[in-house]
Amino acid sequence: KMSIPLLKTELKSSGKIILLFLGIITLYAGIITAMFDPELGAGINALAESMPQFFAVFGMENPGITLLDFLNNYLYGFILVLIPFIYILIMCYKLVAKYMDKGSMAYLLNTHYSRTQIIVTQFMVLLIGLLILLLYATGFIFCVSEVMFQGELEVSKFLLLNAGLFLLEFFLACLCFMFACFFDELKFSVGFGAGLGLLFFLAQMLSQVDEKVEFLKYVTPLTLFMPEGLVKYESHSFMGLGVLLAGAAVFLAVGIMRFKKRDLLL
């Protein structure tokens, strides 16, 4: 159960933030999708081979020649992972950490709604906003692809790719939300999530650049989202998504339990 009045209030107050991120997604996704040119595929591959470390940093070492390959590497390898993550951090601050830091969460709870209802409502606001961003990105990229490159996009694989991206972002959302529920001070409640996220991205980048530190891919959950494997229907890619989903469920449950039992500052 949730607090519907609180849900409506928080969604309304989050509208400008959501619109801002929709604008960012429109800008990046629109420009990059429009850059695809089947005739230049071979040229892009040659460029990637001449500067492998630069392309590898952003997960673009295998650009491919199809539209799906292009989107896979230039959007889903880094940009569309990072943008929703930044949104998650902002919303975890807005929905939980800000109330904790200012000592106003106790006033929010001074209603007939239980702690569980309040915190579940706050998480649903985060989740709904995340869904809006990713559904919009999926629809927008599809529309641009159909207008500019009709018939080039493999739709079923593209939808599967976006489902995998959602599970990764859901995992990151639950992780950051858990930390927001644990601490009162912003440097911990938001800092842990932001810090871990930064480490995850750095570890993934470094593991793709140098074989000597390739082992770092085992310390970041980002590698459990395997776009190339998903579009090839490889079993280990689906197993990775299963691990992300299980981890998200654990983080969310721990965060809610922690919130229910903790003392709140006035």
Image (cartoon, rainbow, N blue to C red):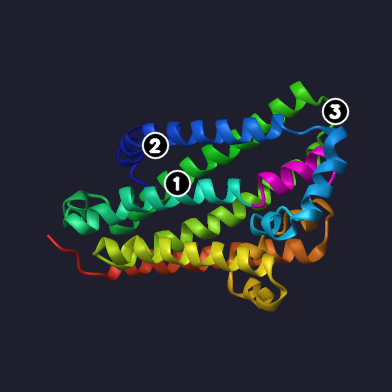
Residue 100 at what x, y percent from top left? Answer: 23, 58
Query: Disc number at residue 237?
Result: none
Q: Secondary structure at mark 2?
A: helix
Q: Hey, what amino acid is under mark 3?
A: Gly
Q: Quadrant of the C terminus?
A: bottom left
Question: Which circle marks residue 17 in the picture?
Answer: 2
Pick the residue in front: 242 or 205.
205
Whole-angstrom CA distance, mark 2 to mark 1, is 8 Å
- Asked if the residues shown at circle 2 and circle 1 are in contact, with their CB atoms under 8 angstroms apart, the answer is yes
Question: Along the horizontal axis of the image, is 34 left or right of 43?
Answer: left
Residue 48 in picture, x, y percent from top left:
77, 51
The residue lying furthest to the top in this view is 147
Secondary structure beneath dot 3 equals loop
Q: CA distance from mark 3 to mark 1?
A: 32 Å
Identify residue for label 1: 87
Stretch of the chain drawn in magenta: 63-77
Q: Earlier in the sequence, mark 2 or mark 3?
A: 2
**Does the CB distance between marks 2 and 3 fall below 8 Å?**
no
What kind of residue is marked 2?
A: Ile
Amino acid type at mark 1: Tyr
Asked whether the viewer can see residue 118, the reply is: no
- Residue beneath disc 3: 151
Of callouts 2 and 1, which one flags the residue occurring earlier in the amino acid sequence? 2
